[in-house]
Amino acid sequence: MPQFETVIGLEVHAELNTASKIYCSCKNAFSREPNTQICPVCMGLPGALPVLNKKVVDYAIRMGHALHCRIRSVSRQDRKNYFYPDLPKAYQISQAQFPLCENGFLEIEADGIQRRVGIARIHIEEDAGKLLHDSACTGTLVDFNRCGVPLIEIVTQPDLRSSSEAKAFLDAIKFILRYLNISDCRMQEGSIRCDVNVSVRPVGSTEYGTRCEMKNVNSFSAAVRGIAYEAQRQIAILEAGGIVEQETRRWDDAAGRSVPMRSKEDAHDYRYFPEPDLLSIVVDEARVRMLYESLPELPDAKIRRYCREYGITREEAVQLAETPERAAYFDTCVMQAQCSAQSICNWLLADAAKYTNDTGIPISDTCMTPQRLTALIAAVEEGQISNSAGKTVFQEVLRQDKEPAQLIAALGLQQNSDSAALAQLIDTVLAANAKSVADYCRGKTNALGYLVGQCMKASGGTANPKMLREILIQKLE
Ligand code: ADP
Ligand code: MG
Ligand code: ZN
């Protein structure tokens, strides 16, 4: 029995967060109230004329640059004709033959394997409306708000080889969209969706097997489940001596399986033709270059820089770079040059992350400014306060909106590092614990822990633990 390899190609649709829609001035914003953000243009009423939103082109070019694409100086918009109730014009304006961006790539890593995934194209298009199946009425309702919302479609080469690679690719795309601030990437609202193409072939084969395209994949985890299911389904067919039919299937995530939608024979013929109401998109070289130069540091470069400059682990760097907000916060903290980058990393990934987890509020939106956090960390690093007192100060800054130094004084958390005072305190404790002292002298070393605890208690938790221990041992010896 041959071993099989899975081959995957993705078509990712991302809604762009421009202020207005792609061909009209309707607001581009998610709204609960159906059919409130529409006009004759996005409703496709006869005689209405589209005007291209220049921002959409800029956003798509930025993504093209981030994925190392060639940007076409002249590209075209085409009509993709099909009937569906959520598409009142009965065609979608998209790009067929001459997309805005082509021939790029994205490097990903999954299961310890590094892979360069080819990007066949990125084109711009308009979104369609949404059908609502409301239990309160017997029919189906249509909300046209989403008609004309700008989309980019990113099409990969069939270069992915496992569901975890597909997941890594999708995560990386989401990362980049967020860094470029061109999409909100809200999965629940459908602002990122993907179609998944899967085929299988015997390991070592150089030809691709017949693929199936899966639609209705609404989350990245659904993509992972869908790929695993589809690969197994195709392998079972081949192992039974059958052949895989090229078809479009619908992923049913609740049922955990895909079902046929249409076969190749009744494949759609969209009768693409150039959109007669719009001119070609012409972008001059200067604009393409300006957009390239305005790109921010992208997640991949940031992660590598964090590892290189600060000596933190890759896992830590990945977490720091998880959102542009957290990365920017970390960068600002490091620039304060008050404490080590590793400590900042530790506090951000532990205490700050926990706070965000519990409250849903990013640390960058709180009164814990990078200045305050680094002052607090510096106080711990310099031994002014203990680590656990530092955690208290962290909570109190967030609660009282005050400076760490103020809180340390007010709460009496200043660590006692006065050796004479510590020595005096230790003498009192030793006098009161003669039995433990005797135990220690007879070689029972665990008596030391007990005595440290007693001294700490006597100091109200403020004794500098390192000094306390040193002086105590000196006295006992
Ligand atoms: P179409 O024009 O029919 O949509 P494309 O050639 O543009 O077909 O491919 C669409 C998607 O299918 C791309 O993401 C591509 O990588 C993927 N794909 C093509 N061939 C295969 C295959 N044999 N196995 C898996 N994915 C494939
Ligand atoms: Mg396709
Ligand atoms: Zn409109």
Image (tube, rainbow, N blue to C red):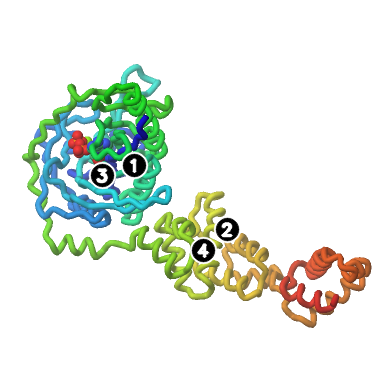
Image quadrant, ligand 1? top left
**Which amino acid is tagged 4?**
Cys
**Disc number lying in front (2 or 3):** 3
Badge 2 crowding class, 10 Å Cα cut-off, few under 14, some 14 to 19, many 20 or more, is some
Q: Earlier in the sequence, mark 1 or mark 3?
A: 3
Q: Quadrant of residue 465?
A: bottom right
Whole-percent x, y for residue 326 in the image: 45, 59
Q: Which quadrant of the figure contains the C terminus?
A: bottom right
Q: Which of the numbered marks, if any, corresponds to residue 345?
A: 4
**Disc number lying in front (3 or 4):** 3
Q: Quadrant of residue 228?
A: top left
Badge 1 crowding class, 10 Å Cα cut-off, few under 14, some 14 to 19, many 20 or more, is some
**Disc number lying in front (1 or 4):** 1
Q: Cα distance, mark 3 to mark 4?
A: 34 Å
Is residue 347 shown left or right of residue 259? right
Look at the numbered disc 2 and give the secondary structure of its residue.
helix
**Which amino acid is tagged 3?**
Thr
Q: Is mark 3 within 8 Å of ligand 1?
A: yes
Badge 3 crowding class, 10 Å Cα cut-off, few under 14, some 14 to 19, many 20 or more, is many
Look at the numbered disc 4 and give the secondary structure of its residue.
helix
Q: Can the viewer see residue 336?
A: yes
Is residue 409 shown left or right of residue 65? right
- Image height of 265 relative to 44, above or below: above
- Image height of 19 relative to 324, above or below: above
**Disc number lying in front (1 or 3):** 1
Q: Is mark 4 within 8 Å of ligand 1?
A: no
Report which residue position mark 2 lands on.
351
Q: Earlier in the sequence, mark 2 or mark 4?
A: 4
